[in-house]
Image (cartoon, rainbow, N blue to C red):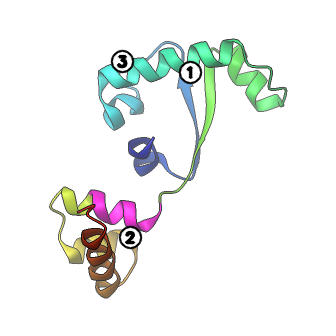
Amino acid sequence: MVRLASVRGGETVYIPAQLPEHHWLIEAVGLDLAKKLCEHFALTTAGSTKQDGANRKAKAQGRARLYLPVLPIEIRVKELTEKKTSTNQIARMLQISQRSVFRYKKNLREAGLL
């Protein structure tokens, strides 16, 4: 879910039962994992008894409705650092100071996560 949240965090997304060819999910996690997610959520929602209107509508359309939370900044800094993104670029992308990026990286290293 971290990969999904890094792409669509803070949004409600719909996971289809049948994956269209150029779906955003494929770009986010790759074709194999996207297919597995679609299969999983198709099975999960088939037996769902959740009764709110949006979930009923999604279920009737053969898809699962899912809210993806916004990732904590530390996780975003870790992901971007692993992609060799510069400190300046990370600061701009996340709208935080360079000093904050350095601090997050230091904390991640001390925790053995970077």
- Using a 10 Å C-alpha cutoff, classify the residue at mark 2 as few (fewer than 14 neighbours), some (14 to 19) or many (20 or more): few
Residue 102 location (% of width, % of height): 26, 81
Q: Is residue 75 magenta?
A: yes
Residue sitting nearer the eye, 18 or 44: 44
- Label annotation for residue 94: 2
- Using a 10 Å C-alpha cutoff, classify the residue at mark 3 as few (fewer than 14 neighbours), some (14 to 19) or many (20 or more): few
Identify the secondary structure beneath mark 2: helix
Distance from Cα at disc 3 to Cα at disc 2: 31 Å
Left-right relation of 76 to 102 = right
Residue sitting nearer the eye, 92 or 81: 81
Mark 3 or 2: in front is 2
Give the answer, above or below, for where 10 lies relative to 57: below
**Which residue is labeled 1 in the image?**
41
- Label annotation for residue 86: none
Q: Which amino acid does label 2 sit on?
A: Leu
Which residue lies at the image location 19% right of the left edge and 64% below the top edge? 85
Residue 20 location (% of width, % of height): 42, 17
For the record, the magenta segment spans: 72-79
Distance from Cα at disc 1 to Cα at disc 2: 31 Å
**Which residue is labeled 3 in the image?**
21
